[in-house]
Amino acid sequence: MPQVTLESAIAGPSQCPAAQGYDYLIVGAGFAGSVLAERLAAGMNRSVLLIDRREHVGGNAFDHYDEAGILVHRYGPHIFHTNAARIVDYLSRFTEWRPYEHRVLAEVEGRQVPIPINLTTLNILYGLAMDEAQAQAFLAQRAEPVASIQTSEDVVINQIGRELYETFFRGYTRKQWGLDPSQLDRSVTSRVPTRTDADDRYFTDRFQLMPLQGYTRMFERMLDLPTIDVLLGTDFEAVRDRVTYRHLVYCGPVDEYFGYCFGQLPYRSLRFEHTTLEQEWFQPVAVVNYPDEAVPYTRITEYKHLTGQEHRHTSITREYPCAEGDPYYPVPRPENAELYKRYKALADETPGVTFLGRLGTYKYYNMDQVVGQALAVYQRIAQAAGMTLETHEIEPG
Ligand code: FAD
Ligand code: UDP
């Protein structure tokens, strides 16, 4: 991965100093920026300067070995899952994979039970021995039909009723978002299904994998191209008027780019408390959720379950949601969607700049969706330039 200094970036592409600047300046070296950088460089031989204000590539998916030598995710657990074979194929150019199916327990009333709620959860919680049909009837009896499902409260109550909603969703959501589920779009809690069979996987996607040597290694391989210069620890403001480029791709917060001219788009942040323990294992699965509002964190992650690493010690992370700090989550609610629309209109009228990624398009996207978004943007750029694309590069539909 060719890393450059600010001085060298100002001078121009390291492979071709005679060129009049870079073809592309890409801000943000997460999935959005890195995938597009790789495609433009490898697919179209464009020169790219990829910058990030952080000291590393990978964005929020960044992982590293901590002081004990345990592979941890700096910004919380990242599990790759998708139904799109073409996205797995694309990323497989840069990594081998470890099959991994994510399982999560929720600690309620002093017991750890599967979440998403499933047959086992219901049987443990209510001391029953129901089969699937009985569990369906049990939930149908508790569900409180909501005529028009708008909010994250509506969607859960409509499915499983108020008691289970309060046990598993209300407190967790209030902690995570600093808002009541009734103030959040239905899309937020809809991410977590309810099941009446004993399937205890968090995701049911066709592909559920972890990069064998970690995300950072995958990003390093993706960016290892002679026409990509990587400049870390550098904010866009430091290069904005100093580096020459023809097109800008901006994967930072869209409201920040426009100087918050319509006001700030709300983002939710997290504080991560990392700990290494002198014991082999801490908990039975990778993630345990704590829906109880009396507990200040939302979940604890134990990384060795995700990575398959063997080590006599173990590292864990507690997540404490907060209002201030790095912008991790766009907050899905109608007024924020309205505000984003105003920024989007401004973005559409700004020539020479493409906004991309979770922050650039204010979308609560998973990694695979961001990869898909970056590949779609590449497809448009390449087709406009008259390039012939490989089959997997063409977005279905
Ligand atoms: P980011 O990864 O946020 O990258 C944007 C980059 O831009 C950052 O590195 C930032 O430093 C940089 N930047 C911003 N502004 C500037 C600027 N002005 N100048 C320079 N650099 C700038 N997805 C999944 O699929 N599975 C999961 O299990 C999962 N778990 C998650 C857990 C947590 C706690 C969080 C927060 C997210 C999780 N995600 C998960 C979502 C995943 O992190 C995102 O989909 C993905 O990382 C988004 O990539 P991105 O490139 O859009 O943004
Ligand atoms: N959620 C909840 N209880 C849980 C798990 C999730 O209330 O035990 C809600 C919460 O609002 C959360 C949302 O469902 O923000 C989506 O959960 P997911 O695990 O997808 O969150 P992420 O991994 O994106 O933080």
Image: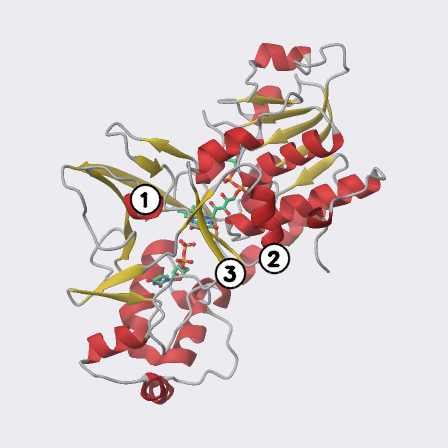
As shown in the figure, which amino acid type bears the numbered disc 2?
A: Glu
Q: Which one is nearer the viewer's eye here, 344 or 128?
A: 128
Q: Between label 3 and label 2, give the one nearer the viewer.
A: 3
Report the Cα–Cα distance between label 2 and label 1: 43 Å
Where disc 2 sits, the SS reads helix
Instruction: State the CA–CA distance, disc 3 to disc 2.
Output: 34 Å
Question: In the rendered image, which residue does mark 3 sit on?
Answer: 206
Circle 1 sits on which residue? 308
Q: Nearer the viewer, mark 2 or mark 1?
A: 1
1 and 3 marks in contact (CB < 8 Å): no
- In-front residue for pair 263/68: 68
Res 388 quadrant in image: top right
Q: Say which mark, if any, is on residue 338.
A: 2
Residue 240 at x, y percent in the picture: 64, 23
Disc number for residue 390: none
C-alpha separation, residue under disc 1 versus residue under disc 3: 20 Å
Q: Is mark 2 within 8 Å of ligand 2?
A: no
